[in-house]
Amino acid sequence: MRKGLEYSGTIDLLIHFFFLFKFSFATRVANYKLSMFSEVYDCIVEFQHTYMKFEKHINSAIRVMNNSIYNYFKENYGTVKSHIDKELVQKYREYSTHSLKEALKRLKRAAAPLTEIRYVSKLLRSKLSHKSASSSISTDDYDKHISKNFWGFVERVVDKPFRILPSFSRDICTGYFQRLFSPDSPIRQFSIPSWFPSLAQPTVSFICEPPSYEKVTRVIRRMKASGSPCLLDQISAICFKRCPFLRAVITIILCKVWRSGNIPHNWKKACTILVHKKSNGNEPSNLRPTTLETVPLKIFTSCLRDSIFSFLTQNKPIEQKY
């Protein structure tokens, strides 16, 4: 592939990339089947017409990309049903932990139905986690357990995890974090002291060009494949790692967002949970928010971070250590 090639919204480059990859590099990528190339190519052609139609509505283009990924996995691999078989519930109702372990071994050895293996495995994990959470060590047995397994004693007694759920309402939580992250919040206001050395004017201008396909690919390859997808779109980073055509499509969307200067509405939403950090759960300040963003937003912010860091590195406002 020609180095430095940028996908700045032209779908013809995608089609050219498809044939170039299909006929020139097919021998290097043994994991991709020829049928998959044709399916993804049809998806790209469909995205071409939709993107041209909704060029001013980037949210529609993002929905088209998400639906294309959903439909591909749905048509080729189906969907997961959360139906619980009542016969399995009745069969393993009285099983102990030891009996479930033996039953799971027999099921795997006999190549039993996958549904039953999953149910027994999930039931066994549930019993083991409940047993470990409810088990406690008497103070009279501390010496015995320390001599037997010191680090196990530390994990179960000294460093025993505990959960504290928030006891305030949703309105109180929303109001607190809105005030905390508002521009008028004291934590967001900072006056630079007079003794701070002033920075020189930058000698290298900030590169405002949108990210190229090559740069987006580097960002995606650095992402952890084990990262959890956001619950809002449920798209994993593995999809972009394994499929070069999705990387080309997301590059087009990123270029459009970069040039517009506005974050799409679909990317402004995220899933946030509150993790306990100190004291009780009566005050929102005793919990810290942890947010799970969508993968396309992570790619966009990573490209923006790299551009900012490159600008700072070239102009050297950061202290250099040698």
Image (cartoon, rainbow, N blue to C red):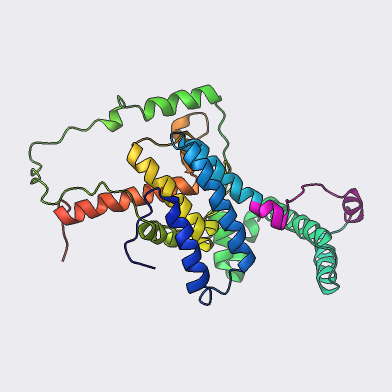
Whether residue 275 is visible here, answered yes or no, is no
34 is within the stretch colored magenta: no
Q: Residue placed at 34% from the left, 52% from the top? A: 211
Whether residue 102 is visible here, answered yes or no, is yes
Q: Residue placed at 47% from the left, 47% from the top? A: 296
Magenta region = 72-94
Residue 182 placement: quadrant: top left
Q: Position of residue 252 (x, y in %)?
A: 42, 48
Q: From the viewer's perspective, is 235 left or right of 90?
A: left
Is the residue 228 above or below the residue 113 in the image?
above
Q: Position of residue 311 (x, y in %)?
A: 21, 51
Q: Position of residue 66 (x, y in %)?
A: 57, 45
Report the front residue among 147 and 4. 4
Q: From the viewer's perspective, is 104 left or right of 43?
A: right
Q: Position of residue 168 (x, y in %)?
A: 55, 26
Q: How many marks?
A: 0
Pick the quarter of the image with the N terminus.
bottom left
Report the front residue among 8 and 138. 8
